[in-house]
Amino acid sequence: MSRFRNEVARLEAHVKSLKLCAAALFGATLLCGLGWWHAPRDLTIHIPPDLRSGSVRKWWDIPPEDVYAFALYVFQALNRWPSNGETDYPRNIYTLSPYLTPECQRYLKQDSTWRAEHNELRDRMRGVFEIAGRGYGDDSTRRVRVLSRNDWIVTLDLDVDEYYRGDLVKRAFVRYPIRVVRYDVDPQHNPWGLALDCFAGSPERIPTPAPSASMKHGIAP
């Protein structure tokens, strides 16, 4: 009789251990489910454009070339006044607000107000574009200065053209030091996860680029 009792006790102990294992597996599954639920649905990974040599990067790392492209894209869009700067400039500030820090938005709104009061916007058309030969690929080490994993200073050499009622009234070559910061607060409206923090210093005029040899002799490229 004792042999049967021992067998029953052994089976009960085994069932108890199986229940404990099942409870542990359920808890582990629950934790995995909670982790999956709280995981980000979208993840932005910056990949260099030339993949022939391969690339190994941390997911949070933003390469300098992407920072430069972002700064140029947003700054060009901000300074594109296709018809009338009096309406285009404030509208651009509002439209691009997800790509601007609050401090930069405040500065640009003050700049817009000051220009309007000094009659520098009405019937003005404006556009800026990169000077040929002075882009990121031409001098990448100087174009983007890495301050930290969250801060950069981008140097843009741009041609600034302004028209008043269709007549060219200003053409200047200007160097803009732009501060860019990590700003991953609204992925839906700002997938870059970056923002302009306006100027890192005073813009400065730069010498007019010399024409190429073909242009000197009147030969079109």
Image (cartoon, helix red, strand yellow):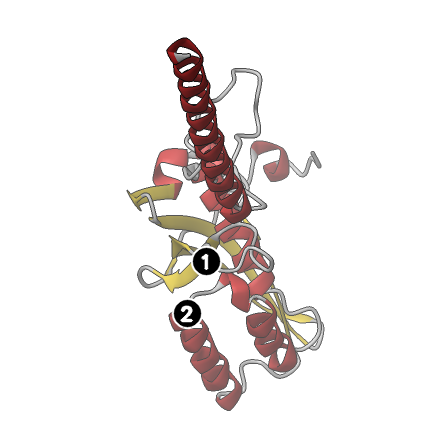
Label placed on residue 89: none
129 over 15 or under it: above or below? below
- Asked if the residue at tag 2 contacts the one at tag 1, i.e. Cβ–Cβ closer than 8 Å, the answer is yes
Residue 171 visible to an observer of this rendering: no
Residue depicted at 35% across the width and 39% down the height = 142
Residue depicted at 34% across the width and 48% down the height = 150
Residue 160 pos. (x, y %): 54, 60
Q: Nearer the viewer, residue 37 or 181?
A: 37
Return the residue found at the far left: 147
Q: Nearer the viewer, residue 168 or 181?
A: 181
Label 1, residues with CA under 10 Å away: few <14, some 14-19, many ≥20 = many
SS label for mark 2: helix
| Residue at numbered disc 1 | 195
Residue 27 pos. (x, y %): 46, 38
Residue 221 pos. (x, y %): 69, 34
Residue depicted at 40% across the width and 64% down the height = 198
Looking at the rendered structure, the kind of residue marked 2 is Cys
SS label for mark 1: strand
1 or 2: tag closer to the N-terminus:
2
| Residue at numbered disc 2 | 104
Residue depicted at 58% across the width and 45% down the height = 42
Return the residue found at the far bottom: 117
Residue 152 pos. (x, y %): 35, 48
73 over 203 or under it: above or below? above
Looking at the rendered structure, the kind of residue marked 1 is Ala
